[in-house]
Every structure is written in C-alpha cells, then in structure tokens.
Amino acid sequence: MNEKIFEMFPILESERVVIKQMQKTDIDVIYDFNSCKESLKYIARNPYKTIKEAEEKLSFHLSRNEDKTAFWWTFTLKSTDEKIGYGGLFDISTTNNKAEIGYGLIKKHWGKGYMSEIMNEILRFGVSIAEFHKIYGIIIPGNEASIRLLEKNGFVKEAHLRDHSYAKGQYFDEAIYSLINQYSS
Ligand SMILES: CC(C)(COP(=O)(O)OP(=O)(O)OC[C@H]1O[C@@H](n2cnc3c(N)ncnc32)[C@H](O)[C@@H]1OP(=O)(O)O)[C@@H](O)C(=O)NCCC(=O)NCCS
C-alpha cells in the first residue's frame, strides 16, 4: 500500500456529502447512530444508553486514526452542514495490505442514495490512492442494503461464518464480502 497517505488525512467529497476526518466534536453523530435500535439491527452491539458509551467509542476511533490503523470519517451534508453518519477503513494491515470497511447512517437519512455516493469515494480512495490490495466488509446476513452496496461495488461473498458473534442475547452469523484490487501488488 501507499503508506504516504498517512502523512495527510484525506478529505473526500461526493456530490452531496463531505467525508472528513472524525473529530472530538463528533460525539453527536456517534451517539445518535449507536443509540438507535433499528440502526444496530444488523450490528452485533447493544444500543447505547449513555453518552459515556459514545465517548468511549469516539475516543477509540480517534486513537485508531492517530496510530494510523484506520481512517475514520464523519459524513456531512453539503446543503445543511448536518452530520448524517460515519464510517471508515479500519483494522488496516500494512503487512497484508488490507483494510476492513464499515459505515452507518442515521436512520432518517437512509434510502436517499447517500451511502452509494460515499462508498464510491471511500473505495476510490482505498483502491487508487491508498492502494490496498484487499478491502473487506463483515455483514450480518439479512442486511440487504449493505449487501447491495457491496455487491454493486464489485465485492463478492467469500465466507459465511456461523454463530460468529454474540450480542443482545443471541449469536449472529457473519459473512465476509471482499474486493480484490487487481492493480495493486
Ligand atoms: C446500510 C446503509 C448504510 C445504506 O445506506 P443508504 O444511504 O440507505 O443506501 P443507498 O440509499 O445508497 O442504497 C444502497 C443500495 O441498497 C438498496 N437498498 C437500500 N435499502 C434496502 C433494503 N432495505 N433492502 C434491499 N435493498 C436496499 C438501494 O436500492 C441501493 O441499491 P440500488 O443502487 O441498486 O438502488 C444504511 O441502511 C444504514 O446505515 N444501516 C444501518 C447500519 C448498517 O447496517 N451498516 C452496515 C453494517 S455492515
């Protein structure tokens, strides 16, 4: 991969959304997303009940940005300056030249094509600039919007892991979808 990318955290931009480095002030979007039961339906995590839980998550993401094992971005609408969600490329392995992709939008912003726009830009960055060889997403089966997003961007299902996570009093299967960058060594 191109390790020079860590020298300057990139701001990405789609038609309607600015995708910029997560900041300490982004506690609102982390809490709004993670306190919503429906948003977490296909994420093996209990909905947050307190701001403290969101603060811990935010500080975890910021420390990963700092130690150069992730790019965590916040998504902001250009038209209103409203934060609509967040996501990133994380668990970056420079040895294996790969990263996991993750994303989520606050529910009132679903179904408007925002994530399709955002994912285009994140993948453009991940493939052409960071030059990861492999980008993968871990999906709980049934999350059709997320599966559609990945498949329409060329990801293919490579594994189905049974009862792979335990949260909310139950086991969840997980599937791995991945994109191999043919142009990276
Ligand atoms: C997954 C998520 C980010 C999608 O964001 P979005 O902005 O609503 O997605 P888009 O509007 O860009 O739609 C993406 C594609 O999925 C399709 N889609 C959207 N909702 C769908 C649904 N419920 N069932 C099937 N397809 C769906 C869209 O039609 C579109 O496909 P198309 O381009 O062929 O029409 C959003 O639903 C979300 O935040 N979910 C909760 C968090 C989450 O599950 N994150 C992923 C964890 S792996």
Image: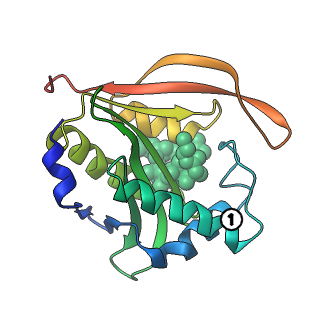
Which of 21/158 is in front? 21
Looking at this view, name the residue that lies furthest to the right.
Answer: 169
Q: Is residue 154 left or right of residue 127?
A: right
Q: How many labels sit on residues?
A: 1
- Of the 4 image quadrants, the one containing the N terminus is top left
Residue assigned mark 1 = 53
Residue drawn at the location 22% of the way across and 47% of the way down? 125
**In terms of image quadrants, where is residue 16?**
bottom left
**As drawn, is 66 to the left or to the right of 34?**
left
Tell me, yes or no, if residue 83 can be seen here.
yes
Residue 129 lies in what quarter of the image? top left
Instruction: Give the SS element for disc 1.
Output: helix
- The three-letter amino acid code for the residue at tag 1 is Glu
Give the vertical position of 98 relative to 106 (above or below): above
Q: Is residue 168 left or right of residue 30?
A: right
**Does ligand 1 reach within 8 Å of label 1's beta carbon?**
no
Most extreme residue toward the bottom, as rendered?
Answer: 80
- When the figure is inspected, residue 105 is found, relative to residue 149, above or below; the finding is below
Q: Closest to the observer: 168 or 75?
A: 168
Q: Position of residue 83 (x, y in %)?
A: 46, 73
Is any atom of residue 112 visible in this view? no
Determine whether, in the image, residue 37 is placed left or right of residue 12: right
Percent of width and height locating residue 134: 31, 28
Q: Kindly identify the residue that appears in the image at 35 percent across and 48 percent down.
A: 119
Name the colour scheme: rainbow
- Residue, x 81% and y 44% (percent of image)? 168
Instruction: Give the crowd class for mark 1: few <14, some 14-19, many >=20 residues within 10 Å.
Output: some
Residue placed at 28% from the left, 28% from the top? 95
Locate the C terminus and report the quarter of the image it occupies. top left
User: Residue 66 at what x, y percent from top left?
Assistant: 35, 59
Nearer to me, 43 or 105: 43
Q: Position of residue 71 (x, y in %)?
A: 34, 53
